[in-house]
Every structure is written in structure tokens, then in C-alpha cells.
Image: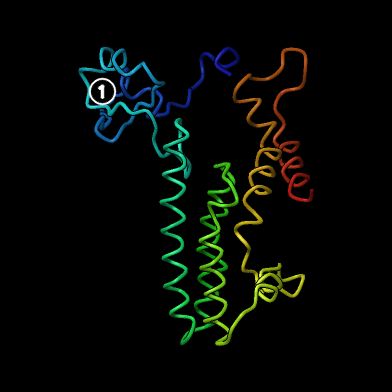
Amino acid sequence: MKRQAEEGSQAWFADDSAKRRGPLRGYHSNDKKSKLVVRAGCKDRAREVFGDTDVEIVSGARYMGGFVRTAKGKRAYATERVQEWQRCVNRIADAAAKYPQAAHTALTTSLQAEWDFFMRVMPEERATFESLRDALTHYLIQLSNHAVTATKAQLTMLPARHKGMRVRDSTKRVAAVYETSTKGTSLLVSTIQNGNPPDGPPFNPFQHHTEIQQAVKE
């Protein structure tokens, strides 16, 4: 784009050019809010380069709903998030006894969308979400005001088109959701990492949208 429109106005993003060009234009980044994620053994070198800034140098950090770098950090972050969702489901379950419709709307249209997004960006094991599934079963008991067997819980957690209640089983979705996300974004990821192929067509957003739809159907 720059080669084709060298004389035209160029978009300037503060997060890309803040340190070099930002101060000249009145933009000053807040280094204390920035984190530099480095590989093992690279922290000393990173401190040499960024020693005159307030950037925090770490081996892993939360990013865009997921976690970057170490497997240990990812697992700790996933456990923390699942525990928080479990507490939220239990609170909604308490409310369901008195306000069933409001509680069900909050769970199915808002809260479970949080762990759905998490599953799309973080590959996790089924066992990580078992405690959350137990909390969802407890919620169904509170909602219906009577005992819910394992079979009934399984049927209740079906989609609405299959006569379920739109409460999705977190342990069954975890692997499928990440795989769907990976397939649906493969074209976009490839273009970001490698650019447009030299002997092929450029990135096509309509093709990207089609691949997302196809991945969801599969």
C-alpha cells in the first residue's frame, strides 16, 4: 500500500509507533502498562535493551482473552478463569430459585459466552472444565427445583433446536471449539504470518468469511 500511495496520507497507529514517533506528535505511551514477553534465558538481554523504561519483562502474560508463552502459566490462568466462572454460575444458581428467567438469560446469553471465547483462543483439556460442568448441573437443579440425573443434565445441555435449554456442556465443547476456531481463521493467520503469496491471489475477506462458515458447519 505504501508503494502504491507514497504521496497519500498513511494510517498511523499509536501502539506501533509510540516510542519512536509518538512524543514528537504529543503521544506518550505508559510503559508501566506494557509487558514484554521473552523466551527463557532472554530476560537479562531484555533488561539491557529496555533498562531505561518501565516496561515489565515477563516470561508469560495474559493477552486478548488468552495467555502468551509458558505452559505452566497457561494452565494456571485457565484454572483461575474456570474457578471464577464456577463461582459466577453458583451465584446465578442461587438467583435462579427466585428469578429463573432472568438467571437463565444471564447465563445463556452472557456468561457462557465468556468461556466459549476462551475455548476459541486457548487449547485446553476436558478435565479443566469438569468443575464448571458440575456447577452447571447444580444450576439446572436450582432452576428446575428438583433433582437432575446425569442423563437429564446431558439432555438439558443440548441446543434449543434439539429441545435443550441452551446450557452448553463445557467439557464437550472445549476441544471442538478450538479446532473450529483454528480452521476458520487459517487463511487470516497465514496471511498475517507470511503475507500474500507471491504467485497467488491476495487475501480475500469473502473467502475468509466462507471458511469460517464452513468450519462452523463441520
What's the residue at 77%, 71% (across, down)?
A: 162
Determine whether the residue tagged by mark 1 lies in a helix, strand or loop. Answer: helix
In the rendered picture of this protein, how many numbered marks are placed on residues?
1
Q: Is residue 161 left or right of residue 70?
A: right
Depth check: give the residue in front, 178 or 71: 71
State which quarter of the image contains the N terminus. Answer: top right
Q: Which residue corresponds to the image point at 42% horizontal and 73% vertical from the top-left?
A: 91
Q: Which residue is mark 1?
A: 23
Name the side, left or right, on which 206 lies relative to 77.
right
Q: The disc labelled 1 sits on which kind of residue?
A: Pro
Out of 11 and 93, give the one closest to the viewer. 93
Measuring from the top left, give residue 60's x and y in whole percent.
39, 32
Q: Report whether 7 appears left or right of 55.
A: right
Note whether 215 is above or below 132 in the view shown.
above
**Where 7 falls versus 160 (above or below)?**
above
From the viewer's perspective, is residue 199 above or below residue 112? above
